[in-house]
Image: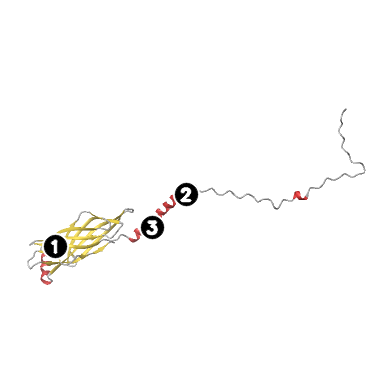
Amino acid sequence: MSIHPKPLETPVAGNPAVAPSPPSITASIVNPYSAPPPPPRPARPATVSSLLRLLISAATASLVLAATVVYVVWLVSGPLPPMFSVSSASLLTDSLTTSFDVTFAVRSFSHSSGIRYTEAEASVTYGGGDSVVAKSALPPLHQGSDSSIFIRARFVAEGTRVLAAIADDRAVKGIVEFGFGFRAVAYFRSSALRPKRHLLMVHCCDVPFGFTNSTAAVLFLSGPQRPCKVELP
């Protein structure tokens, strides 16, 4: 026995077709209370290598800035000149010559740089420094930072001019006065900076010498150490 499918019902003549149901209103409206989007992912924490690079960069920048400031201050302020004084001096006379022996005390107050003296020369003057009676070349010298050194110089003046001046001063004042000078090219060297070159000039004026007795041929520095004027252009 064969089974035949039931034929679709066709609308009966005279009866209208049933319209399909309209879509649900609630289905077409978006739910206003839907869940918000998820928050963004948190930033990944900095790694140890990133922090190390940051610290190295900051330290390098700080060192460069500090070095620049020190260099600018060094250029603007200039070096601190040393202090010179005549610590001891004597002169010996004979019939033709006058010999001088003088020691300069040099004190450096700079805590950051040493001083090297090159092309050094000492001199003896008379008459307020107007007349140079003798000169003496000196070897190169070095002075450490914040230190004291002594520089000894010897001179020989030939002729009777100095002898006559000594005799005149002795008769009038009872003492004789000479001036001493020191001249050198000074390099101020710091451990971190290039040495700076300066012409150093020292003037020790009117250094008095006294006579031990009326016939003495040897004269010595009279009184305490004599401070000198230092020029450092």
Query: Marks 2 and 3: which is nearer the front?
Result: 2
Q: The C terminus is located in which quarter?
A: bottom left
Do labels 3 and 1 touch, CB within 8 Å? no
Q: Which residue is mark 1?
A: 90
Task: Nearest to the eye among marks 1 and 2: give it.
Answer: 2
| Drawn side of residue 177 relative to residue 200, left or right | left
Is tag 2's residue or tag 3's residue first in the polypeptide sequence? Answer: 2
Q: In the image, residue 168 lies at what x, y percent? A: 11, 69
Q: Which residue position is annotated with label 2? A: 51
The answer to which quarter of the image holds residue 71 is: bottom left
**In the image, what residue type sits under mark 2?**
Leu
Q: Give the image location of residue 172, x and y in percent.
A: 12, 72
Q: Residue furthest front?
A: 1
| Upstream in sequence: badge 3 or badge 1 | 3
Instruction: Residue at the far top: name it.
Output: 1
Whether label 2 touches label 3, CB < 8 Å: no
User: Looking at numbered disc 1 in the image, what kind of residue is underneath it?
Assistant: Ser
- How far apart, in angstroms, are the residues tagged by discs 2 and 3? 27 Å
- In terms of secondary structure, where does tag 1 sit? strand
Residue found 47% across the figure and 47% down from its top: 48
Within the image, what quadrant is residue 202 found in? bottom left
Disc 1 to disc 2, how far (Cα)?
70 Å
The residue where tag 3 is placed is 69
Q: Is residue 86 left or right of residue 34?
A: left
